[in-house]
Amino acid sequence: MTDLYKERDFGGLTHTEDAMGDTLTPADVSNLKSIVHARLMEEVEPSHLQAMDDDALMHHVTAVSARLINERHLALPSRVVDMLRKEVLYELRGYGPIQPLLDDPTISEVMVNGADSVYIERYGKLEKSGVRFQDDNHVKRIIERIVAPLGRRIDESSPMVDARLKDGSRVNAIIPPLALDGPILTIRKFARKPYTAEDLVRMGTMSPKMESFLRAAVGARLNIIVSGGTGSGKTTTLNVLTSFIPEEERIITIEDAAELQPQQDHVVALESRPPNIEGKGEITIRQLVRNSLRMRPDRIVVGEVRGGEALDMLQAMNTGHDGSISTAHSNAPRDTLSRLETMVLMSGTTLPARSIREQVSSAIDLIVHQSRLRDGSRRITNVTEIVGMDGDIVVLQDIFTFEQSGVDPDGNVLGQHRGTGIRPRCVEKMHLEGFDLPATIYA
């Protein structure tokens, strides 16, 4: 505690000696906010507070804050009073102390590692924020506020949960006994305005030639896997690829937590469901992939394959559902094939390895591999074609690559996208579908 309230615990709040000024800390505001919040809950029924519109709620918060400040004879600067009212509103209607972080468009990820440890990712780099919660129970209340409206739960019997906010931002929470240092909350924010292909070109994620090639590949109904590590931007790239799908086609999206934002009109969005409190009612991605085949899809877009659904996805691609797109975690295009093979085996199939590889090589046309570089930037590092089998080996060839040339004095990665000069075999299929790209695009 600072010298802001001399000879007293802040919770007493009986008097102040004009020591306010710039010595006010976030902890002081947090304590004062708790008192205002408690007084408000005493004076107004919680159900009535929830039913109020924003203007009426702000009126009550302002009145209670002013009354408390006058009662305690506190000399608070106007900026502190405004901050106090906003934080009480965040507690009532938003997600508590992290609401300003979620509202900040420059922040892409919020990581709560405990009540006193909140980190953010800004422009691809991590930094510690000055935000803090009152205690671990406060963190858990915010987690429950996020997951409860979605029909999810988090408690000792189910201490992990994946969810999403209304804007599509991805949420993961894990609590004790699995989390040893208290409740942990991770929120990967979703862009309110979806990124376009032009945005990715401007940011250097892809080159103009890559954008032209991928636009034609999606239009020609090639099957594509977007691969990469966690946080490499796979979902953003998947969103951009789906924007290339013609408006007249029927798109079915399948995800664990709905994040995709197709801009076409004819879109059917499906989302998996976890088991209920009795351990029943679970609907898996694999079940949804199977069901989607009966829904007359032109395109099947799976947010991520991570298990036995890989087999169903490959079979769909091999039985007339061309133009399917999905993502998978891997470290390189070649690793993507090994991951797919492993995931097919997770379905319980007894197919030999060669048969699985033949299915992969005949089903998938392109692997678009993306990486998050040391400076926080995201780059498509490989656009790789699967050209067939050579014995037991699936043959790959790069069409475009990202060649890193160094790091500048500010730590930014230097490099550029290049064509390999190889004319891909899929050009023939693209030609038949009416997409003719100049040969110089691969140079």
Image: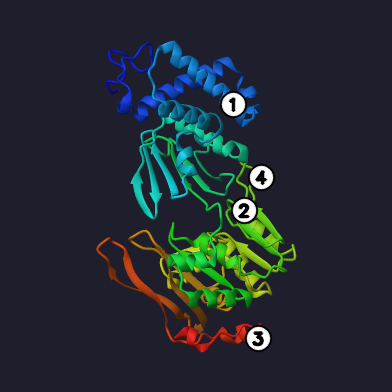
Three-letter amino acid code at the position of disc 2: Thr
Q: Secondary structure at mark 1?
A: helix
Q: Where residue 57 is drawn, which disc sits there?
A: 1
Give the label, 3 or 2, closer to the camera: 3
Mark 3 or mark 1, which is nearer to you? Answer: 1
Comparing 49 with 287, the one in front is 49
- Label 3, label 2: how many angstroms apart (C-alpha)? 37 Å
Could you tell me residue 100's position as x and y percent?
46, 39
Mark in front: 3 vs 4: 3
Q: Secondary structure at mark 4?
A: loop
Quarter containing the C terminus: bottom left
Please give the name of the residue rendered at 44% of the width and 30% of the height, measured from the top-left corner.
83
Q: CA distance from mark 3 to mark 1?
A: 62 Å
Residue 21: image location, x then y, percent: 32, 25
Location of mark 2 (residue): 284
Residue that mark 3 sits on:
432
Q: Earlier in the sequence, mark 2 or mark 1?
A: 1
Residue wearing tag 4: 281
State the CA–CA distance, disc 4 to disc 2. Answer: 10 Å
Picture quarter containing residue 413? Answer: bottom left
Mark with earlier residue (3, 2): 2
Q: Residue at x 56, y 46 (%)?
A: 164
